Image: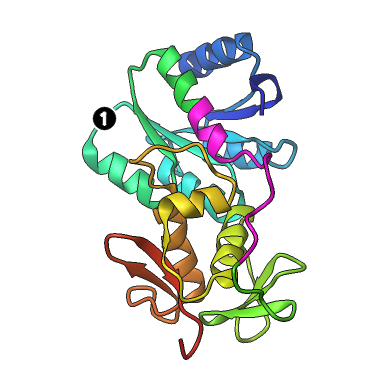
């Protein structure tokens, strides 16, 4: 994805910050939309589809963390939290609600641009097809925890047949796991198999998505039975009775 093709949503209650970021990012080829609040951002989403969102933590009304959670539950986009506090607790909570990165004010705009590009690379969908599964999945649906994953329609359903919203990346993770049951997969393998190849050893995006998936498919997310952690390796999908 080129910068010129990238749409950035900037949500900050400081008009000077919004003006500066719009001018700087537009000057580097990004398409920029700005909002001063969570309500303004939600209204903008009716008419634009951002690739990445820059969210100020300390927004009036609905704060940036709540907005990040809202975006993450509905969209598969990059999210960078921006805060003037620079406190560790903000960074931890931001990552837990699904942010991909965190930046403290004041920041060098060149660093922001570099982080934007890094986050965007994680969400690129171009490249070779997924590696062939070692074990084929029979049929069009597969049970994943307390839910059923429809491999043809890319949809997830609970036991009552109600659709459970998932992002494109969450579907790809579930498909990769379903195609490789009872096999421990490292974070590196999961990144490659889901075509998110640009990452670094400290990237937590896989862990964040696994945590969100557990809340959706596990009967007891705190004691996962389907998406299990393999200490020192990564994660493993265990079908019922596995």
- Image position, residue 28 (x, y; %): 60, 11
Label total for image: 1
- Image position, residue 68 (x, y; %): 48, 45
Screen quadrant of the N terminus: top right
Residue at image position (56%, 53%) is 193
Q: Nearer the viewer, residue 60 or 157?
A: 157
Q: Is residue 67 above or below residue 136?
A: above
Secondary element type, mark 1 = loop
Residue at image position (53%, 39%) is 122
Q: Is residue 107 above or below residue 72?
A: above
Q: Is residue 224 above or below residue 170?
A: below
Residue 228 within the segment the image draws in magenta: no
Is 207 on the left or on the right of 144, as rendered? left
Magenta range: 117-133
The residue tagged 1 is 86
Residue 51 found in image quarter: top right
Is 108 on the left or on the right of 79, as rendered? left
Residue 123 within the segment the image draws in magenta: yes
Residue at image position (23%, 35%) is 87
Q: Residue furthest bottom?
A: 241
- Image position, residue 11 (x, y; %): 52, 30
């Amino acid at each position: 994805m080129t910068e010129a093709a990238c749409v950035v949503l900037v949500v900050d209650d400081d008009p000077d910050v919004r003006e500066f970021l719009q001018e700087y990012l537009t000057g580097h080829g990004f398409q920029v939309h700005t909002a001063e609040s969570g309500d303004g951002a939600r209204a903008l989403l009716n008419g634009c589809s951002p690739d990445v969102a820059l969210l100020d933590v300390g927004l009036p009304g609905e704060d940036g963390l709540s907005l990040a959670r809202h975006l993450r539950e509905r969209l598969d986009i990059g999210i960078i939290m921006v805060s003037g506090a620079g406190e560790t607790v903000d960074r931890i909570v931001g990552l837990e609600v699904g942010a991909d990165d965190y930046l403290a004010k004041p920041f060098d705009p060149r660093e922001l641009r570099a982080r934007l590009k890094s986050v965007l690379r994680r969400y690129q969908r171009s490249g070779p097809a997924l590696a062939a599964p070692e074990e084929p999945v029979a049929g069009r649906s597969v049970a994943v925890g307390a839910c059923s994953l429809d491999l043809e329609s890319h949809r997830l359903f609970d036991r009552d047949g109600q659709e459970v919203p998932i992002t494109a990346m969450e579907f790809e993770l579930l498909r990769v796991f379903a195609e490789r049951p009872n096999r421990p997969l490292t974070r590196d393998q999961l990144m490659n198999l889901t075509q998110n190849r640009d990452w670094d050893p400290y990237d937590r995006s896989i862990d964040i998505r696994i945590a969100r998936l557990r809340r959706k498919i596990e009967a007891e997310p705190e004691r996962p039975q389907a998406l299990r952690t393999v200490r020192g390796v990564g994660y493993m999908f265990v079908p019922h009775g596995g």
